[in-house]
Structure formats: structure tokens, C-alpha cells
Amino acid sequence: MKLLITGGLGFIGSNFILKVLSENNDFSIINVDAELYGSNHHNLDPIKNQDNYKFVKGNITNRHLMETLISECDAVVNFAAESFVDRSIADANPFLVSNIRGTFTILDIIKQQKKRLVQISTDEVFGSLESSSAKEDSRLNPSSPYAATKAAAELLVNSYLVTHDCDCVITRCTNNFGPRQFPEKLIPKTLILANQAKEVPIYGNGKNIRDWIFVDDHCEAVYKVLLNGKSGESYNVSANNEVDNITIVKKILEILNKPQDLIKFVDDRPGHDFRYSLDSSKIRSELNWSESTNFEEGLKNAYLIAYSRLPYEFEIELWQDFASRQKELKKGDDGSVAAFRDVCHALICSNEFAYVD
């Protein structure tokens, strides 16, 4: 299969490309990216010279370019998007262009060329939820300009499904974390500032809740939807790991052995949603997806990313003991997830870890 990945130099797109090419010898990928602020060529250093990977600099609103690229592929996975909420509040125009006009351009081409589209959306299209979790058919209720443009893109996709019988599926995911994340996001920003003993700003009282998922698990969900998702359907992706922002920041400071007084509460941003939550039972039951909780494999991957080596036996034993105590303390798989998160933070903050910009 030959895929066109849009926005593949970004956080989630680059992780998806690495996953697909590492697991499939019969896949090839064209990656089109506009090289904006969230793009990083180093994200794809491991595969940049492979014969089954090709990079093209370009914008998804460029119809002539996109017609050519889509004609060379079997399917499109649209990760390309302006996605930073604060930036959308300051200036929404780039979000309208990329997230709406860009999606329209792709849709109009796949209508003619009869290609499949996986549209990557977000939990933010449902707005803030006081209780319960949004299902695939819940009402769209976006709050920020960013979320509004993603909801508009979903409506465009649905219109092309109904009117033109296009082969499209939509995925919506909760907050991702993991390697290659842009440093404006909460976890990497907190790590960077705290490591430099600088103040860590938190909006409002820090009680805003997000459901966190490791980026590899999100990529696995997108992959399953690409291959087996039913045309015309949408799929919510979540790991059932809801945590408020202040808890995450305090935990990072604890791991780094930094004082809690680095936390600085700042004025809340306009329209800041209190809680996002998705019900992912559909993708679990229909496509047999679940988040990975294999602690030892996750540990090995974390060591390879942080240290370019596998863990020593004594390190595996040490962390497995830690995980078992966390699992007992937190009564179940939540303890394993929390333990693995702590391991990742500890590796990043150790003397052996080398960060290269």
C-alpha cells in the first residue's frame, strides 16, 4: 500500500510514519508537510534515506500539488493541521486556511480520484464535559477557534460522504504525549522549564482535566482505522487516563526533585474548556484496539529512545518491582500506566539522557 501522509514532520504524523514503515515492508509513504513551526525533519531521521519514504515540501491547500501526490497513492491520512489553541485565539486565520480549506482541497480530489481518506480530528470538537464521555454521535460543541475549525472539517467530510459517496473515516483522540512532541505542549514545556529552574505557568487553578494517551497507542488506532475502519464512520480513541493539569506538573517537579514553588498560576485563557473525555468502546469492540500496557516492552522502548540502548537486567528488575508496587497501590492497570509514565520522566531527567535540538 502507498500512503500520502500530510503533516508528517509533526508530532503524531512522524510517529505514525515511523510505526508504519518499521512494521510493514510492503508499505511506502509520501510525506507532504509545509515545514511550519511544529515541523521537525529530525523526527524522521531513522528513515529519511529509505527507498520507501519520500518527502515533499508543500501546503495541502495547493490543489495542483495535492492532485499529483494523491494520484500516486492508495489512501490519504490527514494529520496536517494548525493545532495550538492559544495561537488560534490570537489569530484564527491560519487555522481556517489549513484545517478547513486544506481538508476541502483533499476531499475534492479524493472525490474525483476515488481514494480513501482518514481524517484526524480531536476530542475538542465536543467541547467541555461536566460528566460522562462523548460518544461518536455526541453533539459537536467546540469552544475555541481551533476546535471550531476541526469540527467544520468533520462536517465537510460528512458532506462529501453523503453527497459524493466518498470513502472517508474520522478519528478523534484525546491528549497525546511521547517522543517528538513540540515543546509548547504541557508535558515537554514543564520538563524544559523545570529542568532550567524556571517558573512553570499553569492556567487558572490547574484543575482542567485531560485524558492522556501515549502517542504510539494513538498511531496504532489510526492504523487499524486506515485498514479496517468502515467508510462513513468515526472512531473515538482514548486511554481512560484522566488527570488534571496541576497533578501532572506537580508529579514532574517531584520526579525532577524541583520545588513546587516553581508553579505559577496565570490568568486563564478565554474559553478554556474544563474537561474533555471520550468513550472509546466502539473502536475497542469493532476494531479490537486497546492501549498498550506491556510494561517491559514499554520500558525497553523508553530506554532505546532516551539512551539508544536496552535496559540492563538489574534496571528491568528495579522498574518491574516499582511497577508492581504502583499497580497494587492504585488497584489495577492504572498503576501500570502511572508507573510507565514515571519511568519515562525519570529517564528524560537522568544524566545519561542527551537532548539534541
Image (cartoon, rainbow, N blue to C red):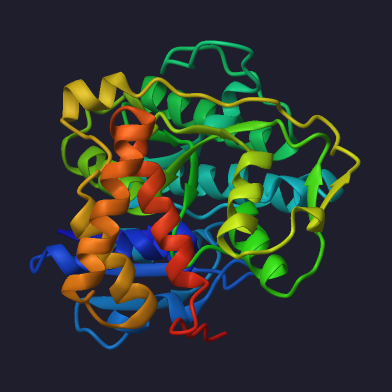
Q: Where is residue 245? Give x, y as percent.
A: 65, 40
Pick whichever, 247 or 41, lies toward us: 247
Pick whichever, 96 or 217, lies toward us: 217
The quarter of the picture where residue 24 lies is bottom left
303 vs 242, left or right, is: left
149 vs 225, left or right, is: right
Q: Where is residue 321? Give x, y as percent.
A: 25, 53
| Image mark count | 0
Identify whether 138 is placed above or below 80.
above
- The residue drawn where x is 83% and y is 36% is 204
Pick whichever, 242 or 226, lies toward us: 242
Q: Is residue 209 visible?
A: yes
Identify whether 185 is placed above or below 125.
below
* Quadrant position of the N terminus in the picture: bottom left
Q: Residue furthest left?
A: 26
* Quadrant position of the C terminus in the picture: bottom right
